[in-house]
Image: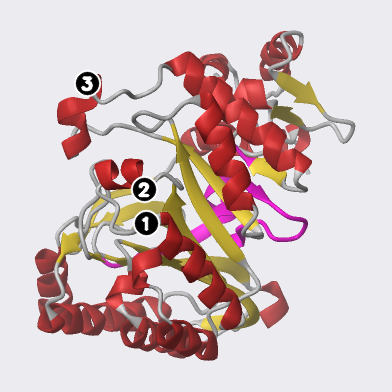
Amino acid sequence: MQLSFRNKKNKIPLGIYVHVPFCRSKCQYCDFYSLTTKDDRLMDSYIDATCRHIKEAGALAPDHKVDTIYFGGGTPSFFGADGMATILTAIRRSFDVTADAEITFEANPDSVSDKLLRRLRSEGFNRVSMGIQTDDDAILQKLGRPHNYDQAVTAVERIRRAGFKNLSLDLMYGLPGQTLDSWEKTLRRVLSLNPEHMSCYGLKVEERTPLYQYKDICGIPDDDTQADMYLAAVDILRSKGFRQYEISNFARKGLVSRHNLKYWMGGEYLGFGPDASSDFGGKRFTIVRDLLAYLDGIKNGGRVLEDVQEIPPRERAGEYLMTRLRTTAGIDPNEYEKQYLLPFQPLEEILQRYASQNLAVHAADGTWHLTPKGFLVSNSIISDLLIIQDECTPLAKKRR
């Protein structure tokens, strides 16, 4: 059998996501898959299974180069540095990881220690994403967060002392008892910690969470107030030198989350660990949402993937609209027509109507993107575009 090797420079960029399903406690609003345990044997089994899974997958990606790695959860910092370091080593042994890869781990303020940070920095991690959510300790307690704001400030000091120069902080607006004024004060106070990246998410009350049971009596701000909070965040962050590059994400120049951009810009990524998702080789699939089933499947060669789909071009075209319009990069008409062989003109007519309402912008380079006000109603805009897209007749392929 003859093997062919793609030149390293021409390899396809690939992101790797590792889902760490362990937490100290479960937040009232959290719908992510996680277990509240510190069972060392279970954690060791998870490490073994994940490393074995990574090795198997690496053999399927010789033409790819890994330029982003992201450890999410769960709470990777609670999981510990030894486990993350072991899994990162397995990734490096099984994949071609670029020298400048962005390597991120998520952390909670209560589980950040000098020892953990020094170890991870020495292993090559170069980005930290920490969930603060709010500076109001009373709200943090209501949400079931395992930390207070003073711990967050101390954690930032430790992260800087360990040598990390790329720090992202998460905040949430629309929280129980929060007002527009208190949200603005929270954002300004957290910005004084000088992060390189900010993520500002509106609270989503999911049915499978404890918060859902008392959502109507806990003082969640109404939709209009939450919209005002969002627009205030855009203005405040812009005034502090942050560029909005996605609905909920803002960064200083050159410091966008390269990993998350893969999701929004149609890049390939592989996920490991229970409930992790992948988009690789033209297929999208998810790992079973059950740690024990994942461990058994990897150990005994059983099925660990579910919802495996091969995405047809028409559906990919719809995804292009949905994900690109989450970003300020937006839609490129020429790229759209070339890639999906569908006419852009019918979509442009819709976008021109929204532009007249200050909800969309036709940029000087020909691309289309939404304004901050447009982001607030992006679901309606995208729905209109998808309806028109479904009615479009494919462009005739050009003869050679």
Q: Are marks 1 and 2 in contact (CB under 8 Å)?
A: yes
Instruction: Check residue 252 for magenta coloring.
Output: yes
Quick one: SS at disc 3?
helix
In three-dimensional space, the C-alpha distance between marks 2 and 3, rounded to whole angstroms, equals 20 Å
Residue 230 image-quadrant placement: top right
Residue drawn at x 37%, y 84% is: 81
Which structural element holds mark 2? helix
| Pointer 1 local density, CA inside 10 Å: few below 14, some 14–19, many at least 20 | some
Numbered mark located on residue 137 in the image: 2
Q: Quadrant of residue 365?
A: top right
- Residue 326 picture location, percent across and down: 58, 36
Viewer can see residue 146: yes
The span from disc 1 to disc 3 (Cα, nearest Å) is 24 Å
Please rate how many residues cluster around mark 2, counting C-alpha atoms within 10 Å: few if below 14, some from 14 to 19, many from 20: some
Tell me where the magenta segment starts and ends, as one range. Answer: 246-273
Residue position marked by numbered label 1 in the rendering: 148
State the image quarter where residue 244 is shown: top right
Q: Earlier in the sequence, mark 2 or mark 3?
A: 2
Q: Can you tell which mark lies on residue 217?
A: 3
Q: Quadrant of the C terminus?
A: top right
> Is 215 displayed left or right of 259 in the figure?
left
Q: Quick one: 64 or 2, which is closer to the camera?
A: 64
